[in-house]
Image (tube, grey):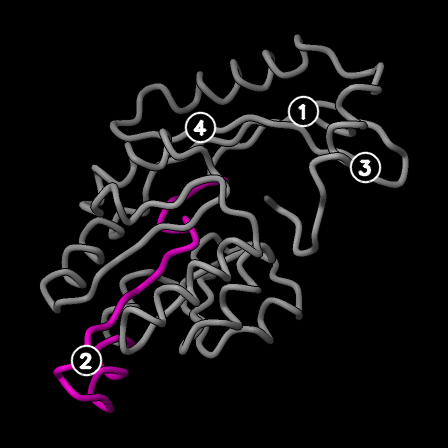
Amino acid sequence: ACSSGVVTIDEISKILHTDTRAKVSDLQICIRNVWNFCKSLQVVAMNSGVIVNKNTGAIEFTITSGGKPFSNAKDTIQKLHVMGIATYIASGDRTDKLLKMADYLGIPHENVHGISTPPVKAQIVRDLKSEYGRVIMVGDGVNDIAAMKEADLAILSEQQFCWKPKMLTDAADIIIRDVIEVIDIVSGDLSGYSSRDQNSCADGGKCREKSRETDSKR
C-alpha cells in the first residue's frame, strides 16, 4: 500500500514464502516497543507489516506504526459535516481498524474503504465524482498521488513534517500544515459553485498521526 506503482500479489507472495531471514520474533519486538509507547493514549491505531525489496527478493524490515488522531481532526470532520460536506476514508489499512477511527471521527462506516491500493483510491475518487458535484482529496503520501490526480482539488498535508518527494508536491493543488485548514479551503472552493451541488471530501487515511511512533527491525 505504500508504493506509488503497481505491485502484484504474486510478486509479494513469492518473496514472503521464500525469505529465510525474517523471524516472527522480529515483528513481535516491533509491536511490543510501539505498544509500550501508545498504550496510554485514549485513541490509538496500530499497524504491522514488512518492507520487501523486489530487487533482492527478501524481507528487508519488519515494521509497526502507531499513533493517535491529530488533535483537530475530529473538529475538522464535524465542521465539514455541518457545512453539508460528505467525508470518506480511503486507506491501505485494514477496514476493522479504520472503522474504529471512523467512529471516533464521526465518519459513517459505509464511507470507509480499507485495504485500498493506489489504483483503488483513484477509482474511489472517480466513483465519488459521478455522485457529487465536486470531490476534494486530502493525502500525504506517494500512495495518494493517483487519487489526487483524479480529484477536482488535491490537498497535500504536511502536518507530519516529513520530507515529501517532488512527484507528490507536484500532484497537489494546495499544500497545508494543519488539517483544520481544509475548512477554509472548502469554504472558498464552494463559493465558486452552486449551493445546490453536493460536495465530498475524501481523506487518504491521513487525519491520523500515523508515524508518531514507529519501530522497525531488520
Residue placed farthest to the right in the image? 56
- Residue 22 drawn above or below residue 78: above
Residue bearing mark 1 = 62
Q: Which secondary structure, mark 4?
A: strand
Viewer-side residue, 64 vs 18: 18
Quarter location, residue 51: top right
Q: Is there CB contact under 8 Å for labels 3 and 2?
A: no
Image depth: mark 2 or mark 4 in front: 2
Could you tell me the amino acid type at mark 2?
A: Asp
Q: Position of residue 52 (x, y in %)?
A: 75, 33
Amino acid type at mark 1? Thr
The tag on residue 46 is 4
Q: Amino acid at mark 4?
A: Met
- Name the residue carrying label 3: 53
Q: Dividing the image into 4 quarters, which one contains the C terminus? A: top right
Indicate which label's residue lies in the foreground, 1 or 2: 2
**Residue 67 shown left or right of residue 211 in the figure:** left
Mark 4 vs 3, N-terminal side: 4
Residue 31 screen position, x and y as percent? 53, 18
Range shown magenta: 185-211
Which residue sits furthest left? 82
Q: CA distance from mark 3 to mark 2?
A: 46 Å
Q: Is residue 160 above or below residue 188?
A: above
Residue positioned 22% across, 61% down in the render: 86
